[in-house]
Amino acid sequence: MIWLDAHCHLANLASALPFEAAFKEANEKGIKGFLSNALTKEELKWYAANAARYGIIYSAGVHPNFPPCDLEYADIARLCQQQRLWAVGEIGLDRMNKDFSAMQQGFIQQLDLAAEHKLPVVLHIVGHQQAAYEILREYPLRYLIHGYAGSTEAFRLFLKLDAYFTISERVLKKDKTLLLSEMLESKRYLFETDITRYYLTQGEINPLLRLIDLAETVSQRYGTGISELKAIQYDNYLLLRGIK
């Protein structure tokens, strides 16, 4: 059984450190799967040149609130047509984007694209949980809600969908104890680092290894064995990909 980083930004990270050495060490430590993400046209070029070499699969989408994202709907449609993507996203709703109408329209347009190509969707939901749920319930798709740290009530709502959730450092905070507990009880989780060059810390040698630290922290706090955490996340990966 392998570890999987269910949401990361490897093209972005590769511009800031000796990627080959970091990737090799992560593999040696058992992290052998990466669901990476593209947010810019430049990152797409990196994946085109390197994804097959490293065995990385990636998603792409027009982000609801990330100004450096210069991807357009046409880019995502082309990648879907070329069967380059494992999923559409990260897409969704974000309360910091004040143009709700345009954001919602872009979200729905990309959901339609995922439905057309029968692809899973990587979701970024910050605020607007009820509005997001009302939209998503209309689409019989598989969802990966990445980095979710919203209300427990909205989490229970999203569980009504064919949804999986990533456990991240965001839910290790004290005020998220109940949310993380319910995520574990649901058994619909994977683990993520969400690592980019923006999240590097001074002196950190290999940020890809954060995934193992995260899983060990969860195991210690909640008394769930590492082998069980690893098995559940891998089964969910297969279900999310439609392999199982």
Image (tube, helix red, strand yellow):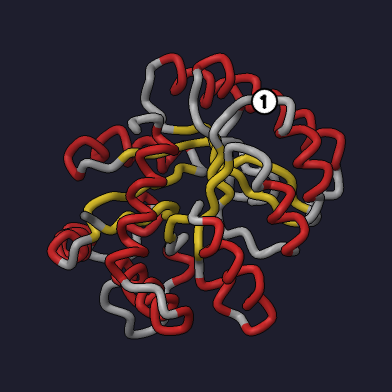
User: 174 or 156, which lies in front?
Assistant: 156
The C terminus, quarter of image: top left
Q: Residue at x 49, y 36 (%)?
A: 60
User: 204 or 138, which lies in front?
Assistant: 138
SS under mark 1:
loop
Q: Position of residue 46 (x, y in %)?
A: 32, 41
Q: Position of residue 79 (x, y in %)?
A: 44, 23
Eyeballing the image, is 150 above or below 219? above
Q: Residue at x 41, y 43 (%)?
A: 43
Eyeballing the image, is 228 above or below 203? above
Picture quadrant of residue 53: top left
Q: Position of residue 21 (x, y in %)?
A: 15, 64
Picture quadrant of residue 182: bottom right
In the figure, is residue 233 to the left or right of 52?
right
Q: Residue at x 38, y 71 (%)?
A: 215
Q: Residue at x 30, y 33 (%)?
A: 48
**How many numbered discs, if any?**
1
Q: Residues within 10 Å of mark 1 (few under 14, many from 20)?
A: some
Amino acid of disc 1: Tyr
Q: Position of residue 100 (x, y in %)?
A: 85, 41
The N terminus, quarter of image: bottom left
Eyeballing the image, is 135 above or below 211? above
In the figure, is residue 55 to the left or right of 104?
left
Residue at numbered disc 1: 139
Eyeballing the image, is 74 above or below 244? above
